Image (cartoon, rainbow, N blue to C red):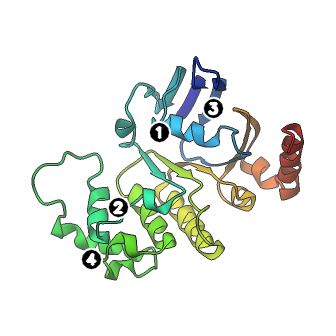
Amino acid sequence: MLELRHVQKIYNPGTVNEMCLFTDFNLKIEKGEFVSIVGSNGSGKTSMLNILCGSIPIESGQICIGGEDVAKQKEFQRHRRIGRVYQNPAMGTCPSMTILENMALADNKGKRYGLGRGTNKQRIAFYREQLSQLHLGLEDKLDVRVGSLSGGQRQAMALLMSTMTPIEILILDEHTAALDPKTAETIMELTDRIVSEKQLTTLMVTHNLRYALEYGNRLLMMHEGGVILDKKGEEKQAVRMEELLKIFNEISIECGN
């Protein structure tokens, strides 16, 4: 369903700061897999997500979604098939616009914009119904500016908005890292429910090892631009926290930390 083939990525090519992160990177994700991705800083986790979404270019290789190579497509073109939630809650919503206006924007993702009204009043009941599933009372605050909401409320909205239109892939880029523990738990439970209900192929980068073990049906650990651990199904369920911590400690010693 999703495949990276022989991907090469070089940062700052031709300069003294040139750094080759991926030399011949290959990864295949099956349709419907919920993949938790962990790894030390600089391991390539976020770079891989950026490559998938088209946020950064690659030197060579293929990025295949549903058998189609999208490596040369622009970021906005790929986003018709990909939903993304960022670490910063402010990046997934427009703070100066109301909840209703944000929902309308998400509802029109991938559609052509004309000079008509941006908000379709006939869709307001649908927006209320969608927001009510968050159990945050946002369905009664449609005229409130999103910038006045808490980080957790905004992240919940960002998650909902990214999956409102039909997508094939959901990208979660440390989407609970900026939240307090209680709110993070709420967002993870919401994430798990949405992914399950919509049967989305999902890649979640996280520094929370417990979340990586508890959520999803596949676990990847990355290091220096490669995958050093890949467990799925029953193998993933058998992985213990002690095993992950041991690998992290070995990596830290290797890197001189």
Query: Whole-Å distance between the Cαs marked 2 and 3?
Result: 33 Å
Answer with mark 2 or mark 3, whichever residue precedes in sequence. Answer: 3
Q: Which residue is mark 1?
A: 53
Which numbered disc covers residue 94?
2
- Residue 32 at least partly seen: yes
Secondary structure at badge 4 equals loop
SS state under label 2? loop
Where residue 46 appears, as percent x and y from the top left, is 59, 43
Give the image quarter of residue 240: bottom right
Q: Earlier in the sequence, mark 4 or mark 3?
A: 3
Question: Mark 2 or mark 3, which is nearer to you?
Answer: 2
Q: Is residue 174 left or right of residue 198?
A: right
Check residue 143 in the rendering and tell me which mark sits there, or answer none. 4
| Left or right: where 226 falls relative to 97 | right
Marker disc for residue 27: 3
Q: Amino acid at mark 3?
A: Leu
Q: Residue at x 41, y 55 (%)?
A: 162
Number of other residues with Cα within 10 Å of mark 3, as a class: few under 14, some 14 to 19, many 20 or more: few
